[in-house]
Image (spheres, grey):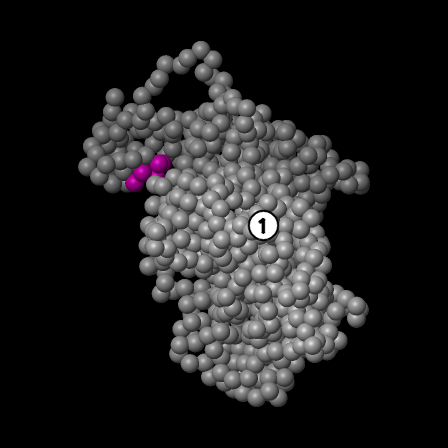
Amino acid sequence: MSTKLTDLAEKLGLTAAELKDKIVELGFELKPRARTVEDDVAALVEDELAAKKNEELDADAPAATDNVTQYEEYIEDQLDKEIIKSQRKMMAGKPLKAKKPGQDKAQVVMTDKDIEIPDQITVKEFSEKTGISPIKVIGELMKNGIMANINQSIDFDTATILADEFSITIKRKRSEAAVEDISTGNLQMLLDEKDKEDLQERPPVVTIMGHVDHGKTSLLDAIRETSVVSGEAGGITQHIGAYQVEKDGRKITFIDTPGHEAFTSMRARGAKITDIVILVVAADEGIKPQTVEALNHARAAEVPIIVAVNKIDKEGANLDKVKSQLAEEGLQPEDWGGQTIMVPVSALTGQGLDNLLEMILLTADLNPLKANPNRPGVATILESHLDPSLGPVATVLINTGTLRTQDPFIVGSIYGRVKLMRDDLGKPIDSALPSTPVRIAGLQETPKAGDILQVVASMDEARRKADQISLLRDTTSAVDGAQGLDSLMTAIQEGRLKHLKVVLKADTLGTLEAVKRSLEDVRKDEVSVKVILGGVGALTESDIMMAAATEGGIALGFNVPANAHVRDVADRNGVQLFTYSIIYQLIDDMKKILSGMLEAEVNEVILGKAEIKAVFLTQKKAMIIGCKVTEGKIENKSRVRVFRGGELVGEGVIGSLKRVNDVVKEIEEGHECGVRFEGDTKLEAGDILESWKLERRERVL
């Protein structure tokens, strides 16, 4: 049956337009030209308006009196009304179904596996996953002080409380990376592991860096020839830019980077591909400018550094000279009382190679490396090219999970399926575990080095996400640069940054040293400025990429220009670039940024006290009580301590606070109130609640 809208509007004293707005406000769909509404919807509208009128008249509220026991009946009555109202809302406009025997009981989904619940889930979805009636879910939420309808979301913690009440077991569902995370190469989001019990040890990934002609490639070749994975000797058929060797039954992955610029570019794109850096220095030549540059890149990556002093067999090799030069650069050898591992080696004779591999494994043991092989694969693109017979192919390093043949995947806006996979020896394989380098075919086009490959559920999903990423890139490319400062400030606010990392350029060496000292003097115990790269001359694209590759990295120029191209590169990579000609302005700006990194001072403030007059309703982890404020004030959502006979007996939180019929933020001294206490302590009449909170005060340098 249905009711005419005009008749209902006249009955309620509303215009037809006001009535339509009210129906939509209650969550029901109403076509613009609708003339009638279902009878149960009409009844619900009448109830809602009648309830509001009653609230205005305070008809349902208990009288203000010294005896607060009337709150018990009032609270129970309100809970019953809210549950009935929600039930009617959900059923309004729907045909009634005959009940089956036993249908009044919660029909919980029975399964051997835990029910997976995401970080956010609607009441309707929770009901569908668990098999519990939405009405019962909403009722339980209301008993816990949460007023939610069927389409509102609850978080995982709230879902856990519900699951406990209904005696079911749930677990957190692993969240998939958002399109924005994949499009920007947010590897940290993709690698996030909430289930620590699934983590297993993985091989270390090692990058070899150093000055040109100091023997990086020959050293890597020598290691491969003497330590290829067992059973594969003589099977080296192709080079893929990354290799695995075996030492004492444990694997080590080596990456042959084409240069420091490529290494930094990949880090700037979110690809933290290496666990350990081997810095190669020739024993007969010592440190060169490229050695220092490689060292700066390795330090910016914040990974352990092992020095391999190569060509130790050559005439003119001077190990002590190399150690002295390295000490000047801050790498103090272990035998000189420092912490830097230095291994003399010869790529030509094989001297020291076993010792170098042992040091790599030792360093890996000191910094445990783990990944989850039981999840869908996530990998980093190391290199790609067009193969005449296979089409686009890419060398990838598995970061976590397992990559298998026939897996559908996305790489940015590119999607595909793994049609063929070969290991570093060119041997076809069906699957690859974390830290394994492989070459894959099945891409539509060649991706860029540093792009992130993620396995998805199906080719349909791969196409959909690739299209979304393509659209997202088109619509956001113009504003990427504006997000740099936001990202920097977000990292500061979240407390991730304690050191401001600076690429600094100045007009003269003397000025550079003076500015560097001034910056390093701007510090407190827990925050400071670190100059990760300094030099003389104008800011360059390479400087910007170094800053982009470092979280919180910024580029500073003092008395030097930054041309339009460099500023454009900074904008595109989200790097903050500042140029100054007055030293105190530079220092003042750095102080402001560092002040934001300081932990705020936190002080406890006692707000007031209240005496419990009566306990009305006891739930599993909550109680509804009547109180009178005897000192100061108590605030909603504040923490409370419970005292009985002058002794502390428990703690909790004020979940909600009511004065007569109104939800209020605070209650002053001398007034009575209804309180929802959340905590494990069982309260008694006569107990004293002490309301308190923590106040934060920002600090400045």
Q: Is residue 358 left or right of residue 202?
A: right
Please state, as top left, top right, bottom left or bottom right, where the N terminus lies in the image: top left
Seen in the picture, residue 148 relative to 593 is either above or below; the reply is: above
Specify whether residue 658 is in view. no
* Residue stretch rendered in magenta on the structure: 21-27
Q: For residue 290, which quarter of the picture?
A: bottom right
Please state, as top left, top right, bottom left or bottom right, where the C terminus lies in the image: bottom right
Observer-nearest of 224 and 646: 224
Specify whether residue 245 is in view. yes
Q: Residue at x 36, y 57 (%)?
A: 386
The outermost residue toward the front is 234
Q: Secondary structure at mark 1?
A: loop
Q: Residue at x 52, y 81 (%)?
A: 557
Seen in the picture, residue 455 relative to 701 is either above or below; the reply is: above
Q: Assess whether residue 36 is covered by the magenta stretch.
A: no
What type of secondary structure mainly makes up the magenta span?
A: helix
Amino acid at pointer 1? Ala
Seen in the picture, residue 202 relative to 616 is either above or below; the reply is: below
Query: What residue is pinned by disc 1?
Result: 233
